């Protein structure tokens, strides 16, 4: 997944927002809340982000961006794959036809 973040304030004013239960994951079986500090995302620059996790139970995976200050978040080329290592992005089988 590639993320580009545009903010209306300098990054130095951003803090960690580490209260995921106060947002959307209240009823989730498991969640992983990632911050821009983990991926060294810079303003107006596309950044590749890779994250490995082990699913627990459940049937759905929800992926979403959450911005709690002014600005925008854009993302592209999201890829979910089974295995231990992230491979380069490739179109899905429906897109390749």
Image (spheres, helix red, strand yellow):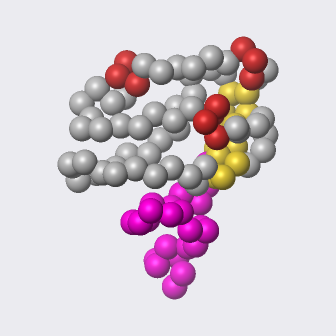
**Relative height, residue 47 to residue 70 (above, below):** below
84 relative to 29 in the view: left or right: right
41 relative to 51 in the view: left or right: right
The single residue placed furthest to the bottom in the displayed view is: 97
Residue located at (36% from left, 37% from top): 31
Q: Which residues are magenta?
A: 75-97
**Quarter-of-image position of residue 44:** top right
Q: Main secondary structure of the magenta part?
A: loop
Query: Is residue 80 one of those drawn in magenta?
Result: yes
Q: Position of residue 16 (x, y in %)?
A: 57, 20
Residue located at (28% from left, 26% from top): 26
Residue located at (72% from left, 14% from top): 13
**Relative height, residue 83 to residue 33 (above, below):** below
**Quarter-of-image position of residue 21:** top left
Quarter of the image that includes the N terminus: bottom right
Query: Is residue 9 one of those drawn in magenta?
Result: no
The single residue placed furthest to the front in the displayed view is: 84
Residue 66 visible here = yes
72 relative to 82 in the view: left or right: right
The tally of labels here is 0
Of residue 72 and residue 16, the one placed in the foreground of this image is 16
Residue 23 visible here = no
Q: Position of residue 54 (x, y in %)?
A: 34, 51
Q: Position of residue 39 (x, y in %)?
A: 64, 40
Of residue 94 and residue 61, the one placed in the foreground of this image is 61
């Amino acid at each position: 997944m590639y993320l580009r973040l545009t903010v209306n304030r300098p990054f130095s004013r951003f803090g960690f927002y580490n209260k995921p239960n106060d947002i959307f994951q209240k009823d989730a079986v498991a969640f992983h809340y990632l911050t821009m500090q983990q991926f060294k995302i810079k303003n107006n620059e596309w950044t590749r982000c890779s994250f490995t996790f082990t699913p627990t139970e459940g049937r759905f995976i929800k992926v979403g961006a959450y911005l709690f200050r002014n600005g925008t978040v854009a993302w592209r080329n999201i890829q979910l794959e089974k295995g231990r290592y992230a491979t380069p992005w490739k179109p899905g089988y429906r897109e390749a036809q």
